[in-house]
Image (cartoon, rainbow, N blue to C red):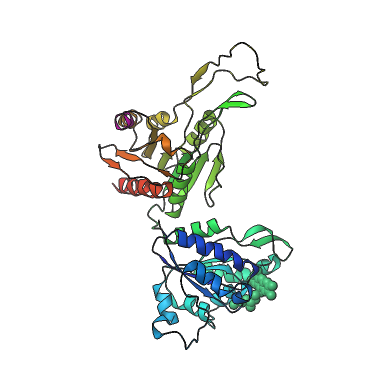
Amino acid sequence: MILKDKNIILGVTGGIAAYKALELTRLLNKKGANVYPVMTKSAAEFIAPLSFQTLSGNPVFTELFDASRDASIRHIDIAEKADIIIIAPATANVIGKAANGIADDLLTTIIMASKCPKLFAPAMNVNMYENPIVQKNISRLKRVGYSFAGPCEGELACGYEGKGRLAPIEDIIDAAEECLSPKDMKGQKVLVTAGPTREAIDPVRFISNPSSGKMGYAIARAAKRRGAEVVLVSGHSYLKQPTGITFVDVITADEMADAAMRHYPQSTVVIMAAAVSDYKPKTSYRKKVKKEETKLTVELERTQDILQEMGNKKRGQFLVGFALETDDVIANARKKLEAKRLDLIVANNPKGFDKDVNQVTIIDKSGGVIELPQLQKDEIAERVLDIVVKGIEG
Ligand SMILES: Cc1cc2nc3c(=O)[nH]c(=O)nc-3n(C[C@H](O)[C@H](O)[C@H](O)COP(=O)(O)O)c2cc1C
């Protein structure tokens, strides 16, 4: 959503990881961005420009002095058109040039001539990356507001192990979205819960639900993009842990309650998107229950109502709950909003379990109802936060 219709200059420089920029081009395109690849001469030694041209659907620029191009696509025009410049992979060389004001080819000239946000995703040999000159150049670029994604630790193409791998493509896209997001949650401390809880019957069986955590993770990522300090308390989930946030993983409803209540007092915004079990076995067996001919009865007792406790202890936090309802959705969600002293409740649909999309209705404490169409969870997260931001601003 954030990248839709954005003009992105993708600077590709001469490292082994240049082939990964093809996947980045494809995914940026899928997100609706217009990608204009600019390759250095060295990059073209690794990957043919035609691959980028095919995937981006745009001509690939390589030359600063190209008499064959018409005058409307001079470097200044490309630079002015860009909403963001992503340099991935970024060599030690391009980082050094950008940090020291050198503009001796098309890419470095565009970097110099453009006022838009710049995002570098370095990839190089660990010794190169740890070289104090490279580190100084990176610090210098950061000081003037340029952003960085990665590099990561791991096995490097040169055979070495260490820091220098190109950041995962999804992380580069997340970082680009962050560069382009409004920072309207700066200063907010946002606590988000996500995912299911598991209540043990015995060491190998538990009561749970199909929640994937996708909604809560999307909210945590969106709040981080918008400048908030984020704590994500997550039940068991297969999702990748978002970067740049405080992550607390829990299993049971009791653990989720402990973690959430520990972070609650210092939070300014709390968004409870977890599917917390309402019941847990009164006693859980220490050893695996053996299969018998007779039936087994498991007595359940209530778990702690985290939202209720938060509502009771509310000290200025903006409190958002999620309500999963199968019937009388709006009426039941409203009851929950009032009983738990929430500022906002998001009534959602069990059909959204484990899906990337959902259809939700947002109800505020003054009775306003916003019914959203079916949307990607990332977009629902943004819409919920738009309302939260308006609510905080009063
Ligand atoms: C096989 C090979 C692999 C290379 N891999 C990298 C790399 O991963 N990172 C890097 O910073 N430089 C790497 N280099 C060195 C750059 O290609 C070299 O510094 C070049 O001048 C970079 O030019 P550019 O920044 O204009 O693309 C590699 C060179 C070769 C020959």
Residue 281 vertical position relative to residue 198 in the rendered view, above or below: above
Report x, y in % for residue 9.
47, 70
* Residue 328 quadrant: top left
Dividing the image into four quarters, tell me where ligand 1 lies.
bottom right
Residue visible at 42% across and 34% down in the picture:
350
Residue 375 appears left or right of 131: left
Q: Residue furthest right?
A: 159
In the rendered structure, does residue 250 fall within the stretch colored magenta? no
Residue visible at 48% across and 31% down in the picture:
276
Residue 171 vertical position relative to residue 340 in the rendered view, above or below: below
Placement of the N terminus among the 4 image quadrants: bottom left
* Residue 320 quadrant: top left
In the rendered structure, does residue 327 fall within the stretch colored magenta? yes
Report x, y in % for residue 226.
42, 54
Report x, y in % for residue 62.
53, 79
Q: Which residues are magenta?
A: 326-333
Q: Residue furthest left?
A: 367
Magenta stretch, main secondary structure, is helix
